[in-house]
Image (cartoon, helix red, strand yellow):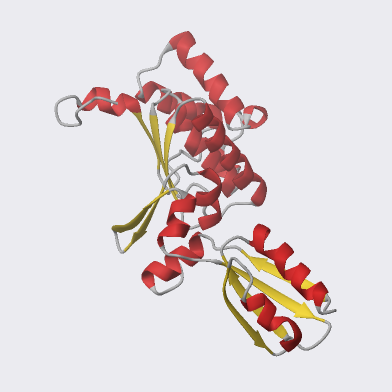
C-alpha cells in the first residue's frame, strides 16, 4: 500500500477494511441504515454514499432485505452485512477474521464466493479461518499458525511437500493380497505397502500415475480389485504433522 501506519495513519486506514469476528452492527437499524452509518464513518456523503451502499447491498446479496432490521437477521445474514460495512470505502486490503463461523451453508457459500470475486477484482484478502477446506479453496498462499506463531508458510502444494505427506490408497481385493503384494511393492511410485485384515494400504507419490500400474499388475495374476479409497494429503494432515495434534478451536 505504501503507507506508514505511524506517519500516515489516515491514509493507511483508508486502504484497509476490517471484518471482525464479532458482529459490529446496530440491531435496531436496518441493513441499509447500518451501511449508511459506516459509510459516513469512512467519509462518504450524499450521492456517492447512496450509490456505494446500493453497490454493497448487491455484492452481499441483501438488496431485497435492506429495509429489515439487522436484529431479525440470521447469523449468516448479519455476517454478510458485517462484510459489507468493510467494503464501503473500496479498500485495497481487507482483513477477515473467521467470517463463516457458526453460519448456515447458504450464507457460507455466498461469503466464500464474495471473497473469490473480490480477489479477482484486485483486492488483497487476509483471511483467517479454522476451516482448512476454506483455506485450500480461497488462498494463493497459506500461513499455518499455532499458539500465535507462524509455523509454516507457502502455497497449498508447497505445504504438502514441505512435510513429505503422501497419498494413501486403501484397496480391497477378491482374494488374498499375497498374490499381488510382491508386484505392487516393486511398482514405480509406491513408497510403502501393507496388507491387514483383507485390505491393502499403499502410500504413493501420485495416485493418478500409480493406480493404473496397480490395476495392470493385479490383472497379470488374475486378482480383481473390488474397491479403492483414495485419501489425498490435505492441510489438516499438514497441521497434524507439524504440531502433533489435531486442529483445535
Give the quadrant of the N terminus: top left
Query: Is 85 or 225 nearer to us in this picture?
Result: 225
Q: Position of residue 43 (x, y in %)?
A: 35, 18
User: In the shown orientation, is residue 71 left or right of residue 14?
Assistant: right
Outermost residue toward the top? 47
Query: Is 237 or 124 nearer to us in this picture?
Result: 237
User: In the shown orientation, is residue 141 left or right of residue 175?
Assistant: left
Query: Is 193 or 77 nearer to us in this picture?
Result: 193
What residue is shown at x 46% (from left), y 26% (from top)? 122
What residue is shown at x 69% (from left), y 78% (from top)? 183
Outermost residue toward the left? 7
Give the quadrant of the C terminus: bottom left
Q: Position of residue 206 (x, y in %)?
A: 60, 60
- Evaluate whether residue 202 shows in this view: yes
Q: Position of residue 49 (x, y in %)?
A: 46, 16
What residue is shown at x 57% (from left), y 48% (from top)? 75
Query: Is 71 or 161 nearer to us in this picture?
Result: 161
- Evaluate whether residue 249 shows in this view: no
Q: Is residue 220 above or below residue 155?
A: below
Q: Quadrant of residue 204?
A: bottom right
Q: Quadrant of residue 187?
A: bottom right
Amino acid at each position: 500500500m505504501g503507507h506508514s501506519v505511524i506517519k500516515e495513519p489516515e491514509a493507511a486506514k483508508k486502504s484497509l477494511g476490517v471484518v471482525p469476528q464479532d458482529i459490529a452492527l446496530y440491531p435496531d437499524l436496518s441493513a441499509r441504515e447500518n451501511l449508511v452509518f459506516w459509510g459516513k464513518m469512512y467519509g462518504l456523503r450524499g450521492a456517492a454514499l447512496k450509490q456505494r451502499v446500493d453497490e454493497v447491498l448487491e455484492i452481499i446479496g441483501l438488496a431485497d432485505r435492506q429495509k429489515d432490521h439487522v436484529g431479525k437477521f440470521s447469523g449468516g445474514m448479519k455476517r454478510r452485512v458485517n462484510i459489507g460495512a468493510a467494503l464501503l470505502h473500496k479498500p485495497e486490503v481487507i482483513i477477515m477474521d473467521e467470517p463463516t463461523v457458526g453460519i448456515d451453508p447458504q450464507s457460507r457459500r455466498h461469503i466464500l464466493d464474495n471473497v473469490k470475486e473480490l480477489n479477482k477484482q484486485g483486492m488483497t484478502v487476509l483471511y483467517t479461518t479454522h476451516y482448512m477446506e476454506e483455506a485450500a479453496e480461497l488462498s494463493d498462499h497459506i500461513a499455518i499458525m499455532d499458539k500465535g506463531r507462524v509455523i509454516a508458510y507457502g502455497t497449498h502444494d508447497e505445504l504438502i511437500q514441505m512435510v513429505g505427506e503422501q497419498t494413501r490408497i486403501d484397496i480391497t481385493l477378491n482374494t488374498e493380497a499375497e498374490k499381488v503384494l510382491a508386484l505392487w511393492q516393486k511398482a514405480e511410485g509406491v513408497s510403502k505397502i501393507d496388507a491387514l485384515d483383507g485390505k491393502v494400504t499403499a502410500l504413493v507419490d501420485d495416485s493418478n500415475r500409480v493406480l493404473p500400474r496397480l490395476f495392470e499388475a493385479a490383472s497379470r495374476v488374475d486378482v480383481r480389485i473390488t474397491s479403492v479409497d483414495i485419501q489425498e494429503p490435505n492441510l489438516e494432515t499438514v497441521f497434524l504433522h507439524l504440531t502433533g495434534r489435531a486442529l483445535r478451536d
